[in-house]
Amino acid sequence: METSDDINRTDSNLSLNNLYLVGFMAAGKTTLARALGKHLGWTTEDIDNLIEEQEGSRIADIFDRRGEAYFRSVERGVLHKLLPKQGIVVATGGGTFVDPDNRAQINRSGTSIWLDVPLDVIIQRLPPNRHRPLAVDRKEIAQLYKRRCAAYSQAHLRLDASQASLGELVKQTVKWLQP
């Protein structure tokens, strides 16, 4: 995996048609996606927002009524609709990249960028409410974080998003994308 400090791209199979921002909940994927989309003149998509629009329901309600397996199925379908597009910046859901099939398709379709934020910062950012169903039990969140980071580490680029400003993250990403 490349880091923001290692600008040399050696993966000849790397596709720069789309950018997929991956990382834990509250890492800043949606915010950075909007900023990158504006900077690049690309369309911005947010998988969680698309799911809520398609289902006519909030993520937490989908989890409560239909369960996580149903949610992941809908998430996979939304991702598959985005894959053939070009010139998009996608804010994925926190669990999207954890699925091996999703991860492989994302890495074939574009460049995956992990917004790496330490767990203590994530916890500070997460409100203790039901808006994020998998964050309700604070004891379980550390285990979930650890499991997901193993998947996130397979992204093409890792950005330390804990201290950097939004402008710095955009600059680092654009620099890394340049040939």
Image: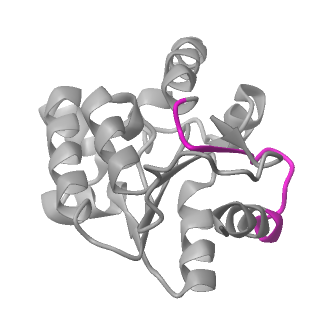
Q: Is residue 26 visible?
A: no
Camera-nearest residue between 81 and 133: 81
Q: Is residue 110 magenta?
A: no
What residue do we see at 15% from left, 50% from top? 77
What residue do we see at 15% from left, 38% from top? 73
What residue do we see at 33% from left, 74% from top? 86
Look at the picture and state if 78 lies above or below 66. Answer: below
Q: Could you tell whether 45 is left or right of 41 in the image? A: left
Q: Could you tell whether 49 is left or right of 36 in the image? A: left
Q: Is residue 158 magenta?
A: yes
What residue do we see at 56% from left, 55% from top? 29
| Residue 98, quarter of picture | top left
**x, y percentage for residue 54?**
15, 62
**x, y percentage for residue 127?**
61, 42
Q: Is residue 102 visible?
A: yes
**x, y percentage for residue 136?**
48, 27
The quadrant of the image that shows the N terminus is top right
The quadrant of the image that shows the C terminus is bottom right
**x, y percentage for residue 34?**
55, 74
Q: Colour scheme used in the picture?
A: one colour
- Magenta residues span 154-168
